Amino acid sequence: MPPSAQRTGRGHARPQHLTSAALDYARRGWRVFPVRPDAKKPPALHSQAACPGRGPCASGHRKWEDRATTDPDRIAAAWAHAPYGVGIACGPSGLVVIDLDVPAPGEQPPPGWALPGVRDGADVLAVLAERAGAAIDFDTFTVATPRGGMHLYYTAPPGTRIGNRAGERGAGLGWKVDVRGWGGYVLAPPSTNTGRPYRLTHDTAPVPLPEWLTGLLTPAPPAPPPLECPPATADPIADLPAYARTALQGEGQRVAGARTGGRNHALNKAAYNLGRLVGAGLLTADHAADHLTQAAAVHLGTGGLTPAEIRTTIASGLTAGTRNPRTITRGNPA
C-alpha cells in the first residue's frame, strides 16, 4: 500500500511520500509520470513542433504517455524537483479504470438516466450491469476521488486496446461514467487536487475487466439499449439503490456458483463484502442475510452445508464486514 501522505502548506503531500508512492506503483508494473502539484495536468512539455530531438526525444517526439515509466532511477530524479502528483498511464500499464463520478450540486440525471435509484455514476454502472444480466466485480483496486466518486481499476483484456470514453458522449457508457485506457491517465494516492486527496479504499490486485464491460468497450461497441422505468414490483430489494442491488446479485451468484469444498468460504466472503455495504448504510443486514440464505440453499446437503452452518457463517461474515464499512461517498463534499 502506498504510504500515507503527510502534508505541507496548501495541502501538498511531502515529496518523499509522493516519490515512495510512485515507486510502489512502478513495482506493480504500472507506468507513472509526474503531474503538476495539487492539480490534474501533466507538467508542461514541449510541442512536437518545438521538439529539440534530444534527451527523452532523441529517437522521436515523446508525449506524457510515452514518458511514463517504471524505471526507479527516472522516477526518483523526476520527483526530486517538486511535490508532483502521481499519474498512472492506464494503457501502457495494462489497466482500464472505470471513473464513477458524482453530480455537481443541483445537477440531475439527463432524461435517459432519470430512473429510480440512479443518483450518480456508480448507480448508472449498476443499471448497465443489470441490463447485461451480469454483476460488477467490486473486489478490485479502488480509489476514492476528491469529489466523492471512485476509480475501479481493472486489468485490460489481452489483445484489446481500449481507449478513453467520457460519459454519454460518442460511445460512452453513460452519465457520470468515464473510462480511462489508452490515451488516458488517473491520479493515484496520495496525490491531491485543489487540496483534496485521492484515497486508497481497497488495496488488492486489480481483477480482469468483466466480460460484459469488455463487450461494451471494444471497437464499435453496440449502443446501450433504451432505458425505461421498470414496472412496479413486489421485489423486496427493488427500492434499494442500483449499486446495492447489483452487489447483492453479484455476491448471490458467487455463493450459488461455489464448488464443493469452497462453498463455506464463498458464503463467508460474500457475507463479509455485503456487511461492508451494511456498515456504509447502503443495505440492511436483513436484506443481505435473506439474499445469501436463498443463494446458499441450493447447496443444502450437497457439500456439507447445513441450515445451522449457513446461518452462523452469514452472521459472522456480516458482523465482520459491518465493522469495516466500504468508503463510498455520495454527493459533494462541503
Image (cartoon, rainbow, N blue to C red):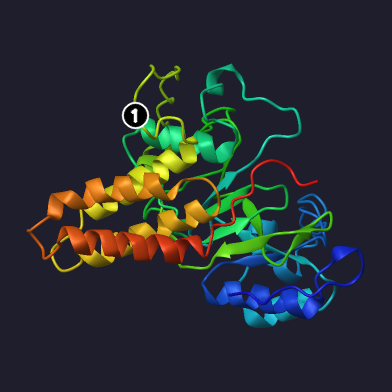
Residue nearest the viewer, comparing 173 with 8:
8
- Secondary structure, mark 1, is loop
Q: Residue at x 63, y 77 (%)?
A: 23
Residue assigned mark 1: 235
Question: Which corner quadrant holds the N terminus?
Answer: bottom right
Does 124 sit above or below residue 142?
above
Residue nearest the viewer, comparing 321 with 102:
321
Name the amino acid, label 1: Asp
Crowd rating for badge 1 (residues with CA inside 10 Å; few <14, some 14–19, many 20+): few
Q: Residue at x 64, y 47 (%)?
A: 149
Does 53 sit above or below residue 40?
below
Classify residue 223 as left or right of residue 263. Answer: right
Classify residue 43 as left or right of residue 244. Answer: right
In the rendering, at what x and y percent does residue 231 appear? 38, 16
* Residue 50 in view, yes or no: yes
Q: Residue at x 11, y 66 (%)?
A: 304
Residue 169 lies in quadrant: top right
